[in-house]
Amino acid sequence: MYVTVPNEFFPQAGKPIYRQRQSDKQSRVKERALITGQTLFREGDRADYVYEVVSGVMRLTRVLENGQRQVISFGYPGDVIGFPRNGRYHTECDVISAGTVKMYRRDALHSCATDVALHKFLTESALEEIALMQDHFLMLGRKTAKEKLASFLIALMNRAGTPLGQYKKIKLPMSRSDIADFLGLTTETVSRTVSEFRHKNIIALDDAHTVIVLEENELLKIAYSN
Amino acid sequence: MYVTVPNEFFPQAGKPIYRQRQSDKQSRVKERALITGQTLFREGDRADYVYEVVSGVMRLTRVLENGQRQVISFGYPGDVIGFPRNGRYHTECDVISAGTVKMYRRDALHSCATDVALHKFLTESALEEIALMQDHFLMLGRKTAKEKLASFLIALMNRAGTPLGQYKKIKLPMSRSDIADFLGLTTETVSRTVSEFRHKNIIALDDAHTVIVLEENELLKIAYSN
DNA sequence: CGGGACTTTGACACCTCTCAACTCTCGTGG
DNA sequence: CCACGAGAGTTGAGAGGTGTCAAAGTCCCG
């Protein structure tokens, strides 16, 4: 999941394109169950599989020697994660909410010899990924803390929000510092900005990890206008 | 070209992986000459071709209604640009330094029916692109102005620097505001930071668009340590 | 020589980071 | 049952970096 920008061609922020995927032939596709806290792969590991998130939430991170960390993306159901570079993963993938992933052998990504449909699905997913990341650049490079957080909540709401009466509820399985490292902020700024939205009655919190969006229009205004 | 981070697997910042590309069969590949200022494609255009930069420099940008602009990347020789989303470009591509591009029909990207080698070249380029963009996230989200500019100069130096005595010379075909929009800064901050490096004798300027790197180690320190 | 775009520099404001303290939750163990 | 500690989240004060606004300088090209 990336923070994307709605435009004339793709008006709905956060909503991924529904990629057609014919039901896996005789469901030969291997799945794997994951528990919270588990590490699916590390940077530098040989990439034997590319994964599609079926349920749960994954966190993809990239770390420098000095401890600086960037959360590259969150893997939500439907997301394809683990695109390799030269046969190796270049991020770490941790499970922040238990779930399952489909496992696709990496060679299906590189060659169409064995399964044309799967190869096409994976390469198209890679192209989609590039487009989403480009939008994310804009967010990282050009938005303020308020705009970043508002965009993030909207993206999550569109992607994984559940109705709650007239409102929408968002579960945040990630920590404040995960959000901060995703948006290029500090935990303190994230926390402060959440509080600000709360005091302005734009959102409400059930607990620190459950947001209820009270004023969606207000969020949209903050995220995208100006 | 992205600003990437050297690590144990890919130690050299900015240096792209040399992607094998067997000489185009009987050189059937169409080329196209481009002049400075020309627009190769716009956001939303139907993507009939994917391009490989042969010479010159391209600028890929993404713009919002309110005028906010993000330079997504600069296309240097060897870069593949114009990856489509749903058959359309999602950035604008302008020529900032005249040159030529190779034109690959888009279907070679989607299907391996006609030219397996070309298909593989393009999809592998897309995977490479994802990896480079992930590094770029780190730069945008976590670096200061000085670190950003130093990293940028190093990337350019490794990619397109020419020897000048014991030093390296870097041509900057893009404007200060292009650099700013690429690094997530303002033109003023870019200009100020360039001046700071100049006053500290880390770099020298022939003119505003020609940098001579005097103290590469100093740049590296600024870019990557702490 | 003049005009316009680009670049540089300055002053100032403000946003975000840093450092620090406090709260809250939760689990452990006396 | 309560004390305690650990970890996460929140809040506050202050500093500093970067954006904003403005003006001057520079270069290019007619």
Image (cartoon, coloured by chain):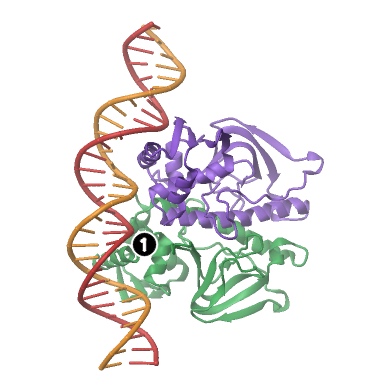
Chain colours: A purple, B green, C orange, D red
Residue at point 24%, 67% (across, down): B199
Name the spot of residue B181 as percent of width and height, x first: 42, 63
Percent from the top left, x then y, of residue B208?
A: 33, 75
Residue A142 occupies quadrant: bottom left
Dot 1 falls on which chain? B
Q: Is residue A90 above or below residue B20?
A: above
Residue that mark 1 sits on: B149
Residue A85 visible, this angle: yes
How dense is the environment of label 1, judged by Cα within 10 Å: few (below 14), some, or many (20 and up)? many
- Which residue, as the protein is rendered here, is positioned at the far front? A166
In this rendering, position of residue A111 left or right of residue B75: right
Closest to the observer, A168 or A165: A165
Q: Amino acid at mark 1?
A: Leu
Q: Nearer the viewer, residue A39 or B98?
A: B98
Of residues B115 and A164, the one nearer the viewer is A164
Q: Is residue A73 visible?
A: no
Classify residue B52 by image quadrant: bottom right
Q: Can you give x and y, in whole percent of width and height, for residue B163 in the image?
A: 40, 74
Front position in the image: B77 or A78: A78
Q: Is residue A7 above or below residue B100?
A: above
Number of marks present in the image shown: 1
> Most extreme residue toward the right, as rendered?
A26
Measured as percent of width and height from the top left, residue A138 is found at 47, 57
Q: Residue at x 38, y 39 (%)?
A: A200
